[in-house]
Amino acid sequence: MKKLVIAISGASGAPYAQRLLAILGERDFGFEMQTSLVLSRTAEQVFVHECGISPRALGLPVFDGRDYSAPFASGSSAADAMVVIPASMSAVARIAHGISDDLLTRTADVMLKERKPLVLVPREAPYSSIHLENMLAVTRAGAVVIPASPSFYGRPVTLQDAIDSVLARVLDHIGLPNALAKRWGQDVHM
């Protein structure tokens, strides 16, 4: 069984998280997967505003920001991979500097110290030099930063196509096979 933690911060970009959770729920990856959801203090409010539903309605185990009884809050029971989507610049900064002041940042800290895949998907524009330095710090610590920047060489037609081009890269980096988006050189004519 693969244990996966999806963390949602209060940054704009909840449709990325909603689509990722839908993909994880509908695809058969050839093995059993346990997906848990961690919400930051403001994640639910932003998710409801942007998606029209609560992330609690998605049928997954949900752990709130101060629930340190979550098994993945300890290295002795670390998840196999974690994705923070969207990742607020506040969450990135706290992760970059080892400030484990809630379950989201504690779990990210566990992933880094246990050398497990941690993917951060920031949805911010423009980036300040502080943002860039924090993203460099988390990358040096072992995380992968995948900005919520869709690719267009696959000629996305719908918003979901554009979102999927980002999520394909996220799934690649946590070791889940997918065909969400056209790969470079795959039926792409210039």
Image (cartoon, grey):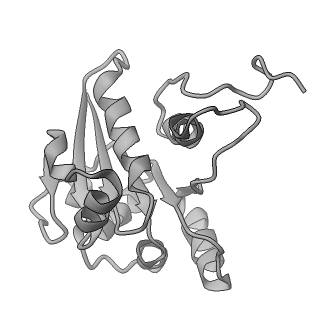
Q: Residue at 54%, 41% (x, y): give it.
A: 159
Q: Is residue 120 left or right of residue 35?
A: right
Tell me where residue 168 appears, x and y as whole percent. Answer: 55, 35
Q: Quadrant of residue 157?
A: top right
Tell me where residue 109 appears, x and y as whole percent. Answer: 36, 66
User: In terms of depth relative to the viewer, which is nearer, 39 or 31?
Assistant: 39
Q: Residue at 90%, 27% (x, y): give it.
A: 190
Tell me where residue 76 appears, x and y as whole percent. Answer: 22, 53
Q: Residue at 60%, 37% (x, y): give it.
A: 165
Quadrant where the N terminus is found in the figure: top left
How many marks overall? 0
Q: Is residue 134 left or right of residue 171?
A: right
User: Against 41, is 19 above or below?
Assistant: above
User: In terms of depth relative to the viewer, which is nearer, 83 or 187?
Assistant: 187
Q: Is residue 76 left or right of residue 176?
A: left
User: In terms of depth relative to the viewer, which is nearer, 47 or 186?
Assistant: 47
Q: Is residue 82 visible?
A: no
Tell me where residue 148 appears, x and y as whole percent. Answer: 57, 54
Q: Is residue 17 visible?
A: yes
User: Against 6, is 177 above or below?
Assistant: above
Q: Is residue 183 left or right of residue 137?
A: right
User: Against 107, is 131 above or below?
Assistant: below
Q: Residue at 52%, 58% (x, y): give it.
A: 143
